[in-house]
Amino acid sequence: MAKSVFIDGEAGTTGLQIGERLRRMPGVVVRSLDPQARRDRAARQAMMAEVDLVVLCLPDDAAREAADMVEGLGGAAPKLLDASTAHRVANGWAYGFAELAEGQAEEIAEAPRVANPGCYATGAIALLRPLVDAGIVPADHPIAINAVSGYSGGGKTMIADHERAGGPAFELYALSLNHKHLPEIERHAGLARRPIFVPSVGHFRQGMLVSIPLHLDTLPGRPTAREIGCTLVGHYDGTKQVQVRKTPVEQRLEAEPAAGSDVMELFVFENEAESQAVLVARLDNLGKGAAGAAVQNIGLMLGLEVTARTLAYATA
Ligand SMILES: NC(=O)C1=CN([C@@H]2O[C@H](COP(=O)(O)OP(=O)(O)OC[C@H]3O[C@@H](n4cnc5c(N)ncnc54)[C@H](OP(=O)(O)O)[C@@H]3O)[C@@H](O)[C@H]2O)C=CC1
Ligand SMILES: CC(=O)N[C@@H](CCC(=O)OP(=O)(O)O)C(=O)O
């Protein structure tokens, strides 16, 4: 029998992307509320009681409240996947990054509650965790992370700001150095020292670059860029949604080619003579950074196969 899914926040930027993919997924029926009942608490909770899985695509406070509504259903509660920041380091929630480490996909498959990772966090953790686990980057190494996102990363409000004339071309933000993704980056990358994270947003809709500069001669054993690349290749070998790529000959990387793809690409750039490297993750903030990961998690949670027909595998 088909599995039923309700997306709370279906009409938002992330909700729409998840709905689009789920409607192409065999074995899934997407249940929706009438548009006028979208914010009606009783109607939402009644729908939650009828489905196999609920996806929350809501602002953090609304997601916490919705998670309590699901919890309130007791034994009849469906599985829950939260796309917001609310539960990514919370007890009792699995972290929905299937490629994180050995056994993570199984943990997601068995968990009643899964938190979908943040878009920037997905790139940063993908680059750092295998290197920390391999002992190449010590957990307490001082790390700085720079990133640029397309404006769809800020949801409906930021999209409207950018799509009316006079929106900003490019800006750094979260300069209090306290961005909401830092706790999950620290926890799930396995860092013992909080990194400095400087996000930015550019005047393009979709796509994201997350970059981490490293002075290789400050790392124990002075690893080469090649050793770092091989560690990443070894870690992601056999996974479809994370691919380690050769660096482009022109030594440039645009963010926008990631738009429309659920594959995250990883690169290791280097200046060998100076013993310097820059690790870069390129992803679609709405793809592997949100809806692509969500659908991958839903497949695991419902025991359904996720194929190229469902996910957007087009790559640059
Ligand atoms: N955009 C991105 O790249 C990513 C976003 N996320 C996260 O996903 C979540 C949704 O973000 P995004 O889709 O961008 O945001 P949007 O602003 O585009 O959409 C938010 C949705 O939530 C609904 N909503 C807001 N408040 C309530 C409420 N109190 N009760 C019921 N519904 C409510 C809105 O309803 P209505 O349509 O009626 O206004 C809207 O559909 C956020 O937590 C965000 O941080 C995660 C990864 C990436
Ligand atoms: C450009 C922009 O504003 N981006 C958002 C992050 C988008 C995202 O992934 O947020 P979640 O934590 O909900 O997953 C921000 O920095 O707040």
Image: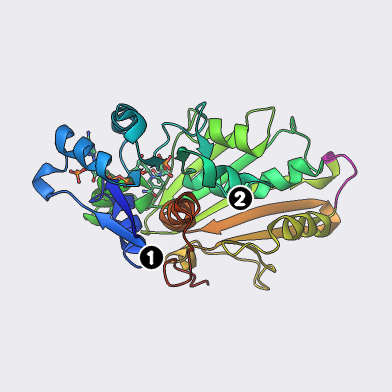
Locate the N terminus and report the quarter of the image it occupies: bottom left
Q: Which residue is mark 1?
A: 25
Amino acid type at circle 1 is Met
Q: Position of residue 156 (x, y in %)?
A: 26, 48
Q: Residue 204 shows which numbered tag? A: none
Where is residue 225, by image quadrant? Answer: bottom right
Q: Secondary structure at mark 1?
A: loop
Q: Nearer the viewer, mark 1 or mark 2?
A: 1
Which residue type does callout 2 highlight? Ser
What residue appears at the point 30 percent right and 26 percent down from the top-left corner? 72
Q: Residues within 10 Å of mark 1 (few under 14, many from 20)?
A: many
Q: Quick check: is 293 in the magenta stretch?
A: no
Q: Is mark 2 within 8 Å of ligand 2?
A: no
Q: Position of residue 78 (x, y in %)?
A: 35, 40
Q: Earlier in the sequence, mark 1 or mark 2?
A: 1
What is the span of residues highlighted in magenta in the rendered image?
218-223
Kindly report the secondary structure that dominates the magenta region of the rendered protein.
Answer: loop
